[in-house]
Image: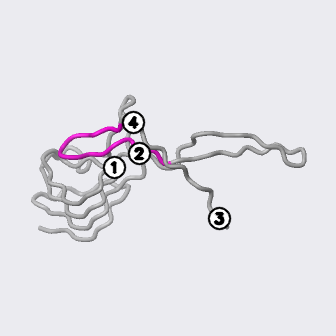
Amino acid sequence: MTVKGENYSNQDTPSIIDTEYVRCNFSHTNCIDDGGIKKGNRLFPGDDTPRTFKDCNLTNCEPPPGSTLIRCPASLSEKMVHVSSKTITIDAVQIEIKSYANIIYGRYKDGAYEYKATPVVVPKKAPED
């Protein structure tokens, strides 16, 4: 069976055995912190049946062991992490300015996590009106 173009982002995915997923979105907004170790959100919890994923978004996901990933981004990251603050005064009023960033910790590849020695911090710009 082939499932094409479905969006399972930020949700548990129904377990379908002997399935190939093509151009599906399984991404989760953030990875999981397991005692200080970043991990992906497990796809099909409790089901270790390998699947094939082609051109799927697996950001912050952990596919079942033995799965085949073909051209699937599988980074481990957190979005909009508060990284610093500063206070400024305008007309005798103090205003706190917060800075946020996306942080990339590593990726899931060939059945294992690969971590960066130092996480990559990608600063976020404030939205412009």
Q: CA distance from mark 2 to mark 1?
A: 7 Å
- Give the residue number, with chain letter if any, for mark 1: 75
Question: Which numbered tag is attached to residue 11?
Answer: none
Name the amino acid, label 2: Ile
- Give the residue number, with chain letter if any, for mark 3: 128
- Give the residue number, with chain letter if any, for mark 2: 104
Where does the image place residue 109, in percent across and percent down from the top left? 22, 46
The local crowd at label 4, few if under 14, some if 14 to 19, many if 20 or more residues have their Cα within 10 Å, is: few
Image side of residue 112 versus residue 33, left or right: left
The local crowd at label 3, few if under 14, some if 14 to 19, many if 20 or more residues have their Cα within 10 Å, is: few
Q: CA distance from mark 4 to mark 1?
A: 14 Å
Number of numbered tags placed on the structure image: 4
Image side of residue 128 versus residue 81, left or right: right
Name the amino acid, label 1: Ser
- Give the residue number, with chain letter if any, for mark 4: 33
Of badges 3 and 4, the one in the foreground is 3
Quadrant in which residue 27 is drawn: bottom left
Main secondary-structure element of the magenta-colored stretch: strand
Q: Which residues are magenta?
A: 102-116
